[in-house]
């Protein structure tokens, strides 16, 4: 005997479909997990894109310089403020910040601070005092010490203590305030800025020596065997050196204004301009992807080699300027 067909449209003959609450909850939970993962990915990817900033504007100027102060000191404080507060410091961001994915911006920012630190040391040791035996300016000494602070310290540094510690931004902001205080006193005639040729020579020699150190870093990496797939270090080195070059390009431009009398007296204008052009060319190199090809490769460029060429050219021109000043 054949079984009667079930009329599914008949609410009396169709079997009732069972409602299983657990299945619905699991489905909702699965969707929620997918949405959460997508949101986290968007948070990191979009956030990192927004926070990525390689500001290599060669025309950057300090705003509201005190009349009678140092142009180079004002530019130093302004660069610190720009990287800390305008673009936000990224080198010490913890894992829950989207900028933790970045490596080019942190290396670039730390390169700038390194250049500013070296210049501030020279200010405290040479330019900001009458002679080597005179007292060191307190504000310059404070700023030089603060700019030596590591750039990757967050409010907690568990490698040294479980207690809160000053973050890198805090120290660098304090350095900026100290530099501005010095410049205000200089404008008021209460601080020293020795515009002597020997001070300019010492400062240029220090910068040239540091450029030599950066060149050695490039050379060491170029001499290593290249990875088969991706070189994960090449962009870190490139942007770290780029930050130094950019910092020095701004500082030397402003030092040229501070020591305008010496440069004109020794007829260094054309040589100074050529040196600045080489330094600017090195500082504004900005490839879409930093590649570590062979220096003589036909298909893949070596951006470190190109950067090193302009760096060494600027360093040679710096040495030529100091040689003229010594005569």
Image: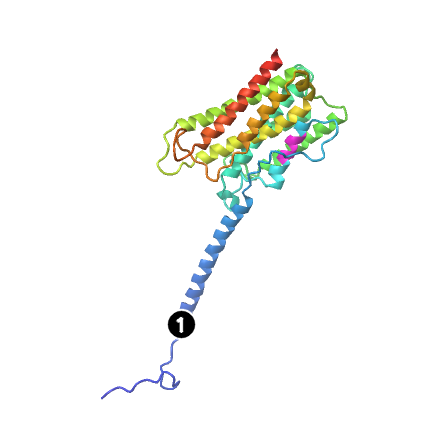
Residue 36 in picture, x, y percent from top left: 48, 57
**Left or right: 7 as drawn, with respect to 71:** left
**Left or right: 193 as drawn, with respect to 300:** right
Chief secondary structure of the magenta span? helix
Q: Is residue 135 visible?
A: no
Residue 224 in picture, x, y percent from top left: 38, 28
Residue that extends furthest to the bottom in the rendered view of this protein: 1
Quadrant (top left, top right, bottom left, bottom right) of the C terminus: top right
Where is 46 relative to 274, above or below?
Answer: below
* Mark 1 crowdedness (10 Å alpha carbons): few <14, some 14-19, many ≥20: few
Residue 89 in picture, x, y percent from top left: 57, 39
| Residue occupying image coordinates x 48% and y 33% | 238
Q: Which residue is mark 1?
A: 20
Asked whether 318 or 11 is in front, the reply is 318
Asked whether 151 or 214 is in front, the reply is 214
Q: Is residue 253 visible?
A: yes
Residue range (magenta) = 74-80
| Residue occupying image coordinates x 51% and y 51% | 43
| Residue occupying image coordinates x 55% and y 35% | 109
Residue 90 in picture, x, y percent from top left: 55, 40
| Residue occupying image coordinates x 53% and y 48% | 47
Residue that extends furthest to the top in the rendered view of this protein: 327
């Amino acid at each position: 005997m054949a079984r009667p067909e079930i009329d599914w449209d008949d609410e009396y003959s169709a079997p009732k479909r069972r409602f299983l609450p657990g299945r619905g909850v699991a489905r909702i939970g699965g969707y929620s997990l997918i949405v959460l993962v997508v949101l986290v990915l968007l948070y990191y990817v979009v956030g990192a894109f927004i926070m990525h900033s390689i500001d290599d504007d060669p025309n950057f100027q300090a705003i509201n310089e005190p009349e009678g102060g140092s142009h180079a000191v004002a530019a130093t404080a302004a660069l610190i403020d720009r990287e800390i507060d305008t673009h936000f410091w990224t080198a010490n961001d913890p894992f829950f910040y989207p900028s933790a994915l970045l490596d080019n911006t942190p290396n670039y920012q730390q390169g700038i601070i390194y250049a500013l630190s070296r210049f501030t040391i020279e200010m405290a040791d040479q330019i900001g005092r009458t002679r080597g035996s005179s007292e060191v300016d307190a504000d310059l000494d404070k700023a030089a010490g603060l700019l030596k602070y590591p750039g990757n310290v967050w409010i907690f540094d568990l490698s040294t203590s479980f207690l809160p510690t000053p973050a890198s931004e805090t120290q660098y902001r304090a350095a900026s305030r100290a530099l501005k205080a010095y410049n205000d006193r200089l404008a008021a005639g209460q601080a020293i800025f020795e515009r002597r040729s020997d001070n300019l020579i010492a400062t240029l020699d220090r910068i040239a020596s540091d450029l030599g150190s950066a060149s050695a870093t490039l050379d060491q990496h170029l001499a290593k065997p290249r990875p088969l797939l991706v070189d994960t270090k090449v962009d870190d080195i490139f942007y770290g050196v780029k930050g130094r070059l950019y910092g020095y390009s701004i500082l030397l431009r402003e030092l040229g204004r501070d020591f305008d009398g010496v440069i004109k007296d020794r007829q260094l204008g054309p040589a100074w301009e050529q040196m600045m052009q080489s330094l600017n060319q090195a500082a504004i190199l900005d490839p879409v992807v930093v590649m570590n090809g062979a220096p003589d490769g036909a298909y893949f460029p070596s951006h470190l080699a190109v950067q090193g060429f302009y760096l060494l050219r600027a360093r040679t021109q710096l040495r030529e300027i100091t040689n003229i000043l010594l005569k």
